[in-house]
Image: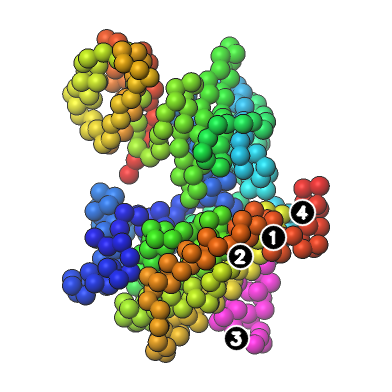
Amino acid sequence: MNISLLDVVGPVMIGPSSSHTAGAAKLAKTARLIYDKPFKKVRFGLGGSFASTYRGHFTDYALVAGALGMNEDDERLGQSFEIAEKEGVEFVFYPTEIPSVYENTARITFVAENGDEFFVEGASLGGGRILITNINGLVCELNATMPTVIVQQQDVKGVVSDVSTILAFNNINIGVMKVSRTSRGEKAFCVIECDDIIPENVIEELRQVNNVLSVVVVNIKGE
Amino acid sequence: MYKNAEELLNLCNAQGKRIWEVALDNEVKLTGMSRTRVMEHFSGRLDIMFNSALKALEQKQATKGGLVDGVANCQYEYSKGESITGGYINYVMSLAYSCSEVNASMGKICASPTAGSCGIVPAVLLGVMENKKVSREKTLEALITASAVGAIYTKNATVAGADGGCQAECGVAASMAAAAAAYMMGASDDRCLDAAGFAMINVMGLVCDPVAGLVALPCAQRNASGAVNALISADMALAGQVAHIPFDQVVDSMFKVGKMLPPQLKETAMGGIATTPAGQAIYKEIFG
């Protein structure tokens, strides 16, 4: 049986809907983890069924709660609007079209004090599971159930090996690694799911590798 | 390894273990967690289930649209007096109502297998545990048994109302809970699965028709009736009623029935009681 019992009896969450409430909170929380900087405003573009049914399922409260860093089982989820106001975070919702095969999609844009913007797109897959599909223009597919490193690099020999060596040297075990590229010799990506949290000094080390263009880390605590 | 009930029972027989033990072994292998850690997770989930089953019994919760505010307290108060089915059945119904009311009011619940059907497994576990003086340890084993049944549906059919209608949510939840109740009463593994099959057969084809698209009406009521369905299905199995259709074939037929249901009856609020004049009036009142 490849279905976890804890996925059958779970998630532990704030109601009423695992896809529209728990999934939405998780999506926004993950987006915040990816962005990992202070922001003064957040815009939520809602696609698919999120756009039509978000009010009845408190998708809006869940998204704001996630952006504020709350988990899907945080009992303050229902007060997220007031908490955002107290913390001085503005938020806005708008309907949008997000090309996706999934039914419940959102584009979450963080706006920094200086006006800089950063967006994360993803989908709620049901049962509280999510998929991140775009990180500020970087198209990807990550479930965000484990600490994940996303490296964008020039497609040349040795980069993948350098990256994995740094992880190994820092005692970080790689669970799953996917490498893809736009075309030969151009931009390539590694999505690396690890068993351990990636510390800041390791992220910095990865950024220093020759031909690495960018490094994004999602430090989700896995089990 | 197993992928369905038949293979699960074969493993139980070959290893001399109960369903929950084989399922727990599999979970340890699958997740890489220790046995102790998995049991801690289950124990934590049982606590959350019981909390949500008790929370609204005396304290009315405020829900979006107000459709199910106070449903648990209503049934709970009634359970203390004269009734047709007796205090116990009415109490179990109130426990299931409580979970649904907590869910609809943005309270904390444990999806089992979904948020919309989160009241059935807790109501049955707590109801049987209290009434039959079953130990917490055995109740935890029953919860794992229920999860193993749920995993068989997840793997071979569906537990999403949007894919299979309410039979895939409250039907599966009742099926899981029936196996758990039978286990708590000392049933053998195959009898537990018979109970699971009876519960599904009782509601096969049940549609998902949420009024105003909210997880409230008729969800809360179907959690209450689903919990009772689980109890009577367990009693059918314990009485020795013959399950002529093997559990795996029940699961398979439920999946096919779900596919046959039109989209209007699968969580879109475009059929069933959602589109009755009263249902539409409620929609207008809430969303304008």
Pointer 3 residue: B86
Q: How far is mark 4 from mark 3, CA to CA?
A: 35 Å
Viewer-proximal residue among A160 and B179: A160
Percent x, y of residue B40: 34, 56
Which quarter of the image is occupied by the N terminus of chain B?
bottom left
Are the residues under marks 1 and 3 on the same chain? yes
Frontmost of labels 4 and 3 is 4
What segment carries the magenta color?
B71-100
Q: Chain of mark 2?
A: B
Viewer-proximal residue among B247 and A42: B247
Q: Chain of mark 3?
A: B
Pointer 4 residue: B283
Pointer 1 residue: B271
Percent x, y of residue A11: 46, 52
Q: Chain of mark 4?
A: B
Q: Who comes first in sequence, dot 4 or dot 3?
A: 3
Viewer-proximal residue among B167 and A218: B167
Residue type beneath disc 3: Gly
Q: Who comes first in sequence, dot 2 or dot 1?
A: 2
Determine whether label 1 and label 3 are within 8 Å by CB: no
Q: How far is mark 1 from mark 3, CA to CA?
A: 34 Å
Magenta region includes residue A192: no
Residue under the image location 41 percent in, 33 percent down: A141
Is B81 drawn above or below residue A213 in the view shown?
A: below
Q: Dot 3: what SS?
A: loop
Pointer 2 residue: B207
Determine whether label 2 and label 1 are within 8 Å by CB: yes
Percent x, y of residue B186: 34, 82
Q: How far is mark 3 from mark 2, CA to CA?
A: 28 Å
Quadrant position of residue B19: bottom left
